Every structure is written in C-alpha cells, then in structure tokens.
Amino acid sequence: MKDELSGGNKIVFGRQKGKMDNQKKQTQGKLKKWIFVVVVILAAAFGGYIFMSGNNPVSNSMKIPFPYVNSVANNTSFACESLLSSNLIGSPEEYLTNGIEGSVNKGTDKVAMSIKDEETLVLQTSASVSAGFTEGDDFIIVQNDKNKLMAVWFNEKAISTVVLNKDNGLAVLLKGNSSFFTYEAPYGSMIYMVCR
C-alpha cells in the first residue's frame, strides 16, 4: 500500500513539475517574443533615423577604428568599454526638441557584466556607480551558448537588452523607454561596446 501511495505521489509531483515546466517555457517564449519586438522597433527607429539623415544635408555620422578583439567564450565576467553610442528622442513641445532628434557620439561609458547563475546576468554601468548605485541590474538570460550571450531587463516603462558575440567580444546594449521624463515620447539608446 505504501508503494502505491508513494508511486501516486510521484505521479502527482511529476504532473506538478511538468505543469511548472510548461509555465516556465510559456513565460520564456513570451519574453523572447517581447525581446524580438523591442529589438525590431529600436532597429527600425535607428534605421529610419539613418535613412532620414541621408536625405538631410546636415548628417551626423561617426566612424572609429575597428578595435582589437578576442574571444570571451570562457569568461563569466566581462569588462566592456563603449566605442560608440547613439540616442533617439522626440517631442512635439517647442521648448524640448519640437521634433525627433538623434545623435551619434564617441562612447564614454564602461559596463561590467557577470553571469550570476544560468538565468541571471548582472550588468552595471560606470554612470550608475557615479550616481551612487552599488549593485547592478539583474538581466534575464534568454540565450547563453559558446558563441553568444543575450539577456533582457524590463519594467512597466523601459526595456534593456544586451547582445554579446563571444567569438570577438563585441556587444550591443539597447535601451528603450515608452516615455522619457517630460518629453512624453519614446526614447531609445544604443551602445556599441568591446568586452574583455
């Protein structure tokens, strides 16, 4: 009789575990879809900016030498340096931008990333350290293999994604806010980095 009960408990536990696994897979599937949507929107916005600036006689582009790169495939922590950064923002208010503006600048920020566990990447910028934050943000790892690391952080107003090519240590950090402070319009930024 005990064998039947313990066997029954195993089946019930297995069903509960299977149900939890299915819920986790559904959540991860939704998260991957959101990441894809955000990356597409940011890429379209950035591409639109580049296209529109091509029709504008005043073009603001920047080119820097390609950095020395090497594999970071065996790293669990990364020290990254911003090479270029770009920002996009819009507002109908005259005292703000009275339109949509974009900029490309030489990178100045530094980023530290470390893999906390198989589901969490901790990311902290030097700007956040300067602002007094002592701990980084926990990003959810959506993919981590020998060639790439992709992770996302989000709340009700903003989303950030990081994509790292482990073969050469180059990475992109994308940020998007649905409404930036008093601008009442979306804001996006992208940082192109080299990580070691």
Image (tube, rainbow, N blue to C red):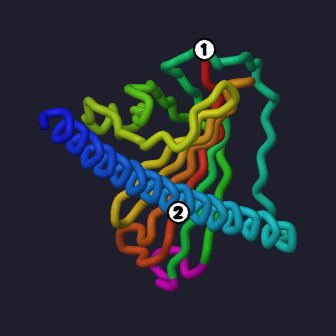
Task: Left or right? Give the position of 19 relative to 26.
Answer: left
Distance between the alpha carbons at the discs numbered 1 and 2: 28 Å
Residue at the spot 42% in from the left edge and 42% down from the top edge:
139
Disc 2 crowd rating (10 Å Cα; few below 14, some 14-19, many 20+) is: some
Furthest-front residue in this view:
1
Residue at the spot 57% in from the left edge and 39% down from the top edge:
143
Which residue in the structure is indicated by mark 1?
A: 74
Q: Nearer the viewer, residue 117 or 189?
A: 117
- Earlier along the polypeptide chain: callout 1 or callout 2? 2
Q: The N terminus appears in which quarter of the rendering?
A: top left
* Amino acid type assigned to the residue bearing label 2 in the image: Trp
Q: Is residue 102 above or below residue 122?
A: below
Residue at the spot 64% in from the left edge and 18% down from the top edge:
72
The quarter of the picture where residue 178 lies is: bottom left
Q: Residue 34, which numbered label? A: 2
SS category of the residue bearing label 1: loop
* Amino acid type assigned to the residue bearing label 1 in the image: Asn
Question: Residue 151 at what x, y percent from top left?
Answer: 51, 42
